[in-house]
Image (cartoon, rainbow, N blue to C red):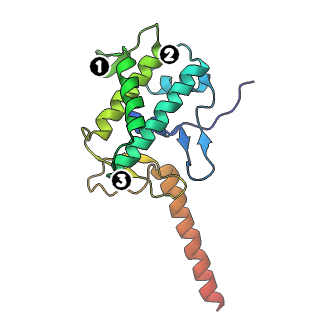
Amino acid sequence: MRARFPDFRLGNVLATSFTGTLSERHGNAVERIPTPHRLVDWLAVNGLAVDSCTPAQLDLARELRESIHAAATAAALQAALPASAVQVINDCSAQGRAAAILTPEGKRQWRLSSASSVEDALSVIAADAISVIAGERDGRLALCASPTCQAAFLDTSQSRTRKWCDMNTCGNRQKKARFHANQRATLGSVKS
C-alpha cells in the first residue's frame, strides 16, 4: 500500500507553486515532497515529467525551493535579495538543458534531456523564479496575510491587493476564524 501524502497546493505560477511544497512555514509546517517519488509526482503535475529522482536531487530541489522562497520574500518586502539564495537560483537555472517546445494546440511544453531530467526541471523552475522576482511578469510579489503561512505569491488581481496565497486554504481559514469570532462576540453580548 502506498503512503498517503498531503495534497499539492497548485497555483498558476510555477515558481511560487514550487515554494508551496512546504506550507505553513510559521506554524506546523507541512512537507508536500517528503520523498524523491513525491517530487517526481509534483513535477509531472506541473508539466515537467521525469522518470526518477535520487535523494541528492530531492535535496537540491529543496535547496532551490528555500532559495526561491527567501528571494521572493525579500522582493515582496522590497529588501535586498539574499546573496546565497540568488546564487542557488542562478546555478540551478544555468545547469539545465530544458527546451521550450510549442505543441500543435499552441501551448508551451518542456522537453527535458534524459541525462539529468530533474536538474532540467529545476532549471525551468529557477528560470521562472528569476522572471517573477525580477518583476518581468504581470503582477506584484506579495506575502500571504496568514500568520502561519506567509508564503510569497504573485498577485495578479486587478487592484493588486490580494491578501491570501490561496483563497481556498489560507483565505478560507481566516474567513472562518473571523466568522466564529463574530459569533462568539454576538453570543457574549446576548448573554450580558
- For discs 3 and 1, the disc positioned in front in the rendered view: 3
How far across and how far down the image is residue 30, in percent? 61, 43
| Residue drawn at point x = 44 percent, y = 41 percent | 69
Count of marks overlaid on the render: 3
142 or 73, which is in the foreground? 73
> The N terminus is located in which quarter?
top right
Residue 12 in view (yes/no): no
**Toward which corner of the image does residue 93 lie, by quadrant?**
top left
Q: Secondary structure at mark 2?
A: loop
Q: Which residue is mark 3?
A: 77
Q: Which residue is mark 1?
A: 105
| Residue drawn at point x = 42 percent, y = 17 percent | 120
Q: Secondary structure at mark 1?
A: loop
Other residues around mark 2 within 10 Å, as few (<14) / some (14–19) / many (≥20): many
Separation of residues labelled 1 and 2 (CA atoms): 22 Å
What kind of residue is marked 3?
Leu
Q: Which residue is mark 2?
A: 50
Q: Earlier in the sequence, mark 2 or mark 3?
A: 2
**Toward which corner of the image does residue 23 lie, by quadrant?**
top right
Q: Earlier in the sequence, mark 3 or mark 1?
A: 3
